[in-house]
Image (cartoon, coloured by chain):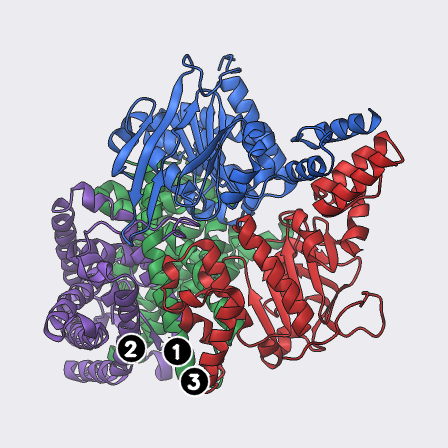
Chain colours: A red, B blue, C purple, D green
Amino acid sequence: MTTHDCDHIHPDDPNAEEVVRISCVRHTYEDGTSVHLCGLDFLAHRGKRVAVLGPNGAGKTTMLYHILGLLKPQEGAVSVFGVSPSEEWASIRRRVGVVLQNVDEQIISPTVGDDVAFSPRQYGLPESEVRERVDRALGLLGIEELADRVPHNLSGGEKRKVALAGALVMDPELLVLDEPFEGLDPKSRQSLLDLLERLARERCMTVVLSTHDIDTVPEFADFAYVLAPGGTIALRGTPEEVFANAHVLAQGNIKPPILAELFSRLRQRDPSAPATALTVDEAADALDAWRRC
Amino acid sequence: MTTHDCDHIHPDDPNAEEVVRISCVRHTYEDGTSVHLCGLDFLAHRGKRVAVLGPNGAGKTTMLYHILGLLKPQEGAVSVFGVSPSEEWASIRRRVGVVLQNVDEQIISPTVGDDVAFSPRQYGLPESEVRERVDRALGLLGIEELADRVPHNLSGGEKRKVALAGALVMDPELLVLDEPFEGLDPKSRQSLLDLLERLARERCMTVVLSTHDIDTVPEFADFAYVLAPGGTIALRGTPEEVFANAHVLAQGNIKPPILAELFSRLRQRDPSAPATALTVDEAADALDAWRRC
Amino acid sequence: MSHIHIPDGVLPVWLWLSGWVIAAALIWFASTRSRGADVRRKVPLVGIISALVLVSMSSEIVPIAYHINLTVVAGVLLGPQLAIVSAFVVQVVLALLGHGGVTVIGLNTLMTMAEMLLGWALFRAFVRVLGRTRVRAASGIATVVTLAITTTLLVGLVAASGVTGATARETGALDPQNLTFASPFSEGVVGVGLFSGGEKATAPAVGLKRFATIVYTLGPVGWLIEALVTAAILGYVARVRPSLIFEGPLAPTERILPGDELGVH
Amino acid sequence: MDVAVLDRSAVSGRSHLHLAAPRAKLLAFALLLASIVVTTNLFVVLALLLVLLALVAAERLPARSMLPLAAYPAIFAAVFAFASAPDALAAALIVAKAVTAALAAVTLMFTTPYPQVFAAVQRVTPGLVGDALLMTYRAIFILADKLADLTRAIRLRAGIAGTHPVRSAKATTRALGGLLLYSVDLAQREYDVLVLRGYSGRLKVAEHPSRSPITDRMLVAGALALLGVATVWRIYWIGLIDYSWMLPALALLGLGATFLFRGRKR
């Protein structure tokens, strides 16, 4: 895989290649609950990492299901690689890798190696290529030694890695992850963040993930979307832009990251306090500089 | 329920009433995995909120299962209310409320009301008292309106509240929660924290919970225990004491809370920086004061 | 063929009633023999395996014609005592969902029970003969033999019921004489075409032969599907968690902790 | 089999039937079954079916979910009837009996929470059976959810249908194997939770009291009347056979009246 230049694409840049677009989709569940993904269009461009934030029940999973063609929009339009996923999933599914929330149920084969090989075997690739791909995917996640293990006996974090290897084995152009940090300890979380960063940079992979772990967003995302309860897309932008709008976050029952909160308190007391820093290092720099001046 | 005075009990205070004690328990699973809960004794005193921290696979759940008598120690001793839970669970189970990780599987009745009524009915309480207790438990969590709902249509957060109501219905003296914050949005998390605080204060309830959400620990816990991989109890103390030991946390693959990290960075640059503050308010105060002086 | 799709009020009373009596006796026998704590520990397992059988029955492979039953799998995992309870539970739920008759729960329980018990016994026998390494073969053969036997039992049951002909008279259930009735339409075209008494003197053997032919020609395809599925599932379990199959159903199960507890080795 | 819809109706429905005591409903159900067993007259069965339909309509039960469930056994009954019934009339009778009995069962389940129904079974069976029954029902939901998750995962990772039926079948079977292991682990966890919450060998179900004794009495009386009619027609069939058509006609009038009344009320 060659390295592309995927940087510096702003969501409003007309030249950027759109991978996912959701425009005002409404979905009504059987029990009458309705999710209306509207307000702003949801966009994900090639090579970008996009985070979907929102409280429980805001419709994050509903949104991802629409991208995956698991739900059919009753109103509005969804487009992935230019087609409607609910109608033409078969034509794009090789280009999309998915890990949903319950990794347990996504592991379907008796050994880890077999499970990662599931998609290429189903697509009928020759066995030598299947093996090569499996080795590569396991290597990416650093879990080569798990290849012969039985998935049922793995820990939650290991299972998540296996599921991710299974999603990456076909070299997808779009990776969709539902709450991928749930149940991961800090070290595993960090290595997942690093991997996603590398995939987006080196392979121009587009990553769309949902999370309510706000503190990982500044580290992870190129762009973030914030869903308010009911599905309204309340905010979009770079993490800095999003977290600057503390009141919209509060309306959406989203706690801003601790550092954003700290800096806004400091500014309340003393308007000369620095602008919000999003990582610990930046914050330490900013505070240090502030004190000295 | 009368209000007791449960404050100011230090774990080393000889007069404090011990509710749980685990001394050097070893557990070996059939596949050879061994968890050795040793190093320091684990203690929980009446009316205290105790957090068990640790990375994936350190043995947090194993520890809770020992407290609940679901596992029998092969070495060492566990005591809950002075008896061994694996041998005499029946004699103490009315005094212990439990919510395990998969709340979905813990809701076993067709309506929320029936589910919360499960324990009192099993214990054969008269129906009028059962109903009174159910109303009280639902009221505690503010979910009275869910009483007649079917559990499988509830959201994840609602299910967690229902499970908690079922655990509180017998007015337990000890509440054991495995990863209770998983899947909760900030608002629900905050109201759970408030409830636990109230229960501990007003009813002298002892709360033992496991979590890897380190940032809630300062808000929640009176004492925290840190498990290193393999189950070794590496640290114990108040959150302040625990988070001051950054190197032990790092060894245990635990990322210290963001604020602790920020303050330790600041102290590295400038030794005059203030001591670690654990809440945003305290941090803002400390930084403000630091700048002024 | 794990249950007969014969509605209420068709089989003679003596037949379905004796089905109930025998089933009740077996259930009573099984539950008095299993009062120990080790059995009580398995109650959720009975519930969940029964649910698995129900779920698989309701997901059709070929719509209407075939659904898998997993009865042999259930038998192997539950062992004889618990399988008896499970068979009854499955049939009660099916009947209450309108899936089969209520009066025939007894007979249906016996059919399902026969399948589970035969499956269990044959599987154990074949494993002993073929060795533990050939679980797939053993379970496949056991399934085909089991289903062939229970299908024959079903045909025998229908023959015994006599619903197919003149013997129905003594039970009164489908007395051709009772079935002729006069209605305002009975003189018209409709009456003659649809509601005439028909060939009253149909020989009993004809109906039974037709029934048997249908069952034995459509059946084997279903047996084969079931055998393949059973072999795959039991093969998988034998590989991943052999103790479930080989150590007997009442052996304590390995406790797999949820979440994150098995990371350390 | 959409068990979730059934459960929602049983628990949150507000019709008269929901108010009646589970015991009364079970008794009426048993009497109705007895009528179906007793009768040999197609018109009597049709009348029973129409009465049930009128009841469903009058109570505004979710007919859209109920009727397909009730009609399902018709398929098997038809196969059986084709294979063994001597003539078209007998075949029609077999199918009608199947559908009527199924509708009665479905009506019971749609208006009564399952523990209330199973509690009746639990009272007359050994502890093991009643408990297993209650746990089975709950487990159906969990497993159906899991199965849906599994098939969704397979669809996303390669698709079930299509070009490689053998490969797809293999994948489905593996999924079932995974589901089985999950079930076994689930059983263990379920038992743990039960013990933690106070289970000691017998699940206790509090019987719902009747919230409308009049409905109870009317239900049982109505079912008794139907059984009476069925019995009379069975015994004196020679004399009554000419008037058989009147029963379904009457029931049809009742059904029509129900719809009319329902429409006007709106």
Label 2, secondary structure: give it.
helix
* Type of amino acid at the residue the image marks with label 1: Ala
Q: Could you say where residue D209 lies in the image, as x and y percent from the top left?
A: 40, 34
Looking at the image, which residue is at 74% across and 35% down?
Answer: B270
- Res. C228 mark: 2
- Res. B127 mark: none
* Type of amino acid at the residue the image marks with label 2: Leu
Same-subunit check for callouts 1 and 3? no
| Mark 3, residue position | A127
Label 1, secondary structure: give it.
helix
Say above or below: B12 vs D117: above
| Mark 1, residue position | D169
Camera-nearest residue between A246 and A221: A221
Camera-nearest residue between B100 and B142: B100
* Residue D122, picture quadrant: top left
Q: CA distance from mark 1 to mark 3?
A: 19 Å
The reply, left or right, for residue B221 in relation to residue A151 is right
